[in-house]
Image (cartoon, grey):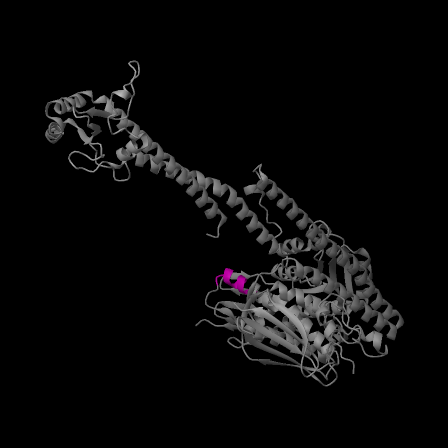
């Protein structure tokens, strides 16, 4: 019963059904009672016969007449005495008994003092006979009861009831559907938008409605339009920035080589070159940071984390060697070989940035250890260094772009861990930092398994 | 010693400038290939550069001149395609970001008629452009802004490959695949294979040792004249292109298999 559609549908249907049912039953009983009452006046001949029998033989004559009354006349007759008992001892049908109760029939003769004026003829629902001894007998003439229909008092009535139920069911369903279905579509679009699909719109399916839901839908669409436009603008902006910054950088590096050729290998040239490379790296990191936020161009694939970590470590070790850092080594232990579904490039970028960060903060001749394990439904990667660690108050801020800890060396672009966090979140994973017991910083990634 | 992995760049701040530069550690401008720059190009060569940055073109012309590399600069793809059709060039350098017809479309156009070696210039980090470029038949790529010495090294590696004097090694055969290193012709049965220079070299490496695994490092050294870079998928892309061409030529029995994490091997008819 969670669905709004079913709840609205059932409550409408129930209410309409109950209303129709009560109205139909009440109408049926009322008309039946009226008909029976009227029929008592219409069988004058029968009443006269009874009157004759009473005149001739008194109460016994009436009993005999009742016993002899032919069955084929389609009538059932009850005669009640003043105690409201049938002369033949039959039970009085319930509806007639109720009718009599309602009208407070005078079951006794009240004598001449109650003589009606000549111009008044009191109509009673039932005929009464008065014997010579003053006993009053009430006659109830009923049409012989038809066998009841299977579904109700009459077949006609039950068909009507079923039709009413079906029609009210359809109407209720349509009404409930009209309310619940646009809400469901809106929700689907919202979820899709939140998942990063900026093309999600509801307009085509809901937007034509003129009611509040239709307005909500068109508001949603214009909001999504604005979001998509601003995301587009941001991407465009960062692309333009990168292009505009890189063209001069590219020229600068060629000019530098030309100058080096002219003037010989001055040490200053090397410094210019290094700064140019640093700028280039920074621009690249900013770009990949902005890119990690939007939906990546790549497709998700099955990733063997052990393989991936092995490749990253090979490359970082190689980088250390070529950068002349021989003192720090990266070592890995694999307690499990979990596989996940994710974006391989983003994962490589995350793990690489984290290991590089660990290496950068390692003291000489120490080890960065990487441990891959499996915790319940998650793959877990721990990257620990033997460096000084980070003040507890600063741990949560490590993943902010360009955040630098108080006593950290001014190295790196300041974006590595921010990129890592975005990349891990892109893969539905989580990342946090803590100080390990041995001192040193420990970064922990957890990624949901397949 | 200072721990330094980021790029080697910040060393400049903390250390004496006299410290030898660490090589950059970005994903592709990775090696300053000194060993290559020592080797001169025996022949002069003419190169087309298709790039809308005119000033860069002018400076590169100056930069490449001492190595007897003659650079023709074209500011857009249309001009570049026209020059390529008119002249006799040894190599094309193609920027992906071009006004009008973009670099990838230009590459597709070039590959319709010519097997000229192509080096692409891509935006750093744009892996999709890079992969598509290699799939469209580029031989190698370089992220922009590049180290000019790295560009020179790549140019020389590719030119050396095309100008290599072939020892009389004779033709190589496996099943229906035939390779004639001297004339640089390849065929599968009756069908001639149109291979780029890189694909030709890869196929040759694999044909020399049929059934044995050739590592990706070896393939990169032989076919591209450079070391395999971290996360470098260019050999994989070239192999997949080669596989496609062999299959389209009707090869079913011989196939290039991937030995995960090691390299590739060509399996003979079984």
Q: Residue A273 or B4: which is nearer the viewer?
A: B4
Q: Is residue A224 left or right of residue A105?
A: right
Residue B39 x/y as whole percent: 75, 75
Q: Is residue A270 left or right of residue A380?
A: right
Q: Is residue B246 left or right of residue B144?
A: left
Residue in view at x 76 percent, y 77 percent: B4
Figure disc tally: 0
- Looking at the magenta stretch, what is its main secondary structure? helix
Residue in view at x 29 percent, y 35 percent: A98
Q: Residue A421 or A6: which is nearer the viewer?
A: A6
Residue at the outermost right position: A263
Task: Please identify the quarter of the rendering in which residue B228 is found.
Answer: bottom right
Q: Is residue B244 magenta?
A: yes
Q: Residue A442 or A359: which is nearer the viewer?
A: A442
A25 up-or-down from A237: above or below: above
Q: Which stretch did the figure color magenta?
A: B242-250
Residue A104 x/y as whole percent: 30, 30
A319 up-or-down from B124: above or below: below
A227 up-or-down from A50: above or below: below
Residue B123 x/y as whole percent: 71, 60
- Residue B197: tell me if it is visible: no
């Amino acid at each position: 019963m969670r669905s709004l559609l079913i709840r609205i549908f059932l409550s409408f249907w129930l209410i309409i059904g109950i209303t129709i049912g009560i109205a139909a039953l009440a109408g049926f009983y009322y008309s039946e009672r009226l008909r029976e009452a009227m029929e008592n006046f219409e069988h004058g001949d029968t009443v006269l016969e009874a009157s004759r029998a009473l005149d001739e033989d008194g109460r016994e004559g009436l009993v005999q007449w009742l016993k002899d009354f032919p069955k084929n006349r389609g009538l059932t007759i009850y005669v009640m005495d003043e105690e409201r008992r049938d002369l033949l001892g039959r039970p009085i049908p319930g509806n007639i008994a109720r009718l009599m109760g309602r009208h407070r029939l005078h079951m006794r003769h009240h004598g001449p003092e109650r003589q009606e004026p000549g111009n008044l003829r009191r109509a009673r629902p039932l005929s009464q006979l008065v014997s010579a001894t003053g006993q009053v007998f009430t006659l109830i003439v009923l049409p012989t009861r038809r066998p009841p229909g299977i579904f109700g008092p009459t077949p006609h009535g039950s068909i009507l009831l079923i039709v009413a139920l079906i029609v009210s069911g359809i109407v209720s369903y349509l009404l409930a559907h009209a309310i619940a279905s646009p809400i469901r579509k809106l929700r689907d679009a919202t979820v899709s938008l939140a998942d990063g699909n900026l093309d999600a719109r509801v307009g085509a399916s809901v937007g034509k409605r003129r009611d509040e839901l239709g307005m909500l839908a068109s508001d949603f669409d214009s909001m999504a339009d604005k979001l998509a436009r601003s995301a587009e603008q941001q991407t465009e902006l960062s692309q333009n920035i990168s292009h505009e910054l890189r063209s001069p950088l590219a020229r600068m590096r060629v000019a530098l080589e030309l100058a080096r050729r002219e003037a010989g290998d001055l040490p200053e040239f090397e410094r210019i070159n290094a700064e140019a490379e640093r700028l280039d790296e920074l621009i690249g990191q900013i770009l990949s940071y902005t890119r990690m936020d939007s939906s990546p161009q790549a497709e998700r694939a099955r990733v063997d984390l052990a393989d991936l970590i092995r490749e990253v470590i090979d490359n970082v070790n190689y980088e250390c060697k070529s950068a002349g850092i021989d003192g720090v080594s990266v070592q890995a232990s694999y307690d499990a070989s979990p596989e996940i579904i994710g974006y391989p490039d983003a994962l490589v970028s995350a793990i690489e940035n984290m290991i590089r960060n660990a290496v950068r903060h390692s003291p000489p001749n120490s080890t960065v250890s990487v441990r891959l394990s499996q915790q319940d439904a998650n793959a877990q990667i721990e990257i620990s260094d033997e460096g000084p660690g980070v003040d507890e108050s600063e741990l949560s801020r490590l993943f902010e772009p360009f955040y630098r800890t108080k006593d950290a060396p001014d190295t790196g672009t300041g974006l590595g861990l921010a990129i890592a966090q975005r990349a891990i979140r892109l893969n539905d994973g989580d990342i946090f930092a803590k100080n390990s017991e041995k001192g040193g910083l420990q970064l922990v990634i957890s990624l949901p398994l397949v | 010693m200072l721990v330094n992995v980021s790029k080697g760049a910040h060393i400049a701040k903390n250390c004496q400038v006299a410290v030898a530069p660490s090589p950059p550690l970005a994903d592709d401008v990775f090696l300053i290939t000194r060993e290559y720059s020592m080797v001169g190009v025996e022949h002069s060569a003419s190169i087309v550069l298709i790039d809308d940055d005119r000033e860069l073109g002018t400076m590169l012309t100056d930069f490449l001149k001492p190595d007897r590399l003659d650079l023709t600069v074209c500011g857009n793809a249309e001009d570049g395609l026209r020059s390529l059709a008119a002249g006799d060039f040894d190599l094309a350098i193609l920027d992906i970001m071009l006004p009008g017809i973009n670099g990838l479309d230009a590459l597709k156009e070039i590959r319709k008629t010519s097997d000229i070696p192509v080096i692409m210039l891509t935006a750093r980090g744009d892996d999709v452009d890079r992969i598509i470029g290699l799939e469209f038949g580029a031989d190698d790529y370089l992220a922009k802004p590049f180290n000019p010495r790295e560009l020179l090294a790549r140019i020389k590696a590719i030119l050396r490959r095309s100008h290599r004097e072939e020892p009389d090694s004779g033709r190589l055969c496996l099943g229906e695949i035939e390779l004639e290193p001297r004339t640089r012709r390849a065929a599968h049965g009756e069908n001639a294979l149109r291979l780029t220079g890189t694909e030709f070299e890869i196929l040759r490496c694999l044909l020399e040792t049929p059934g044995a695994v050739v590592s990706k490092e070896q393939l990169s050294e032989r076919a591209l004249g450079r070391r395999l870079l971290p996360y470098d998928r260019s050999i994989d892309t070239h192999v997949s292109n080669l596989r496609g061409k062999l299959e389209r030529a009707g090869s079913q029995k011989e196939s290039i298999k991937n030995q995960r994490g090691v390299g590739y091997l060509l399996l003979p008819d079984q």
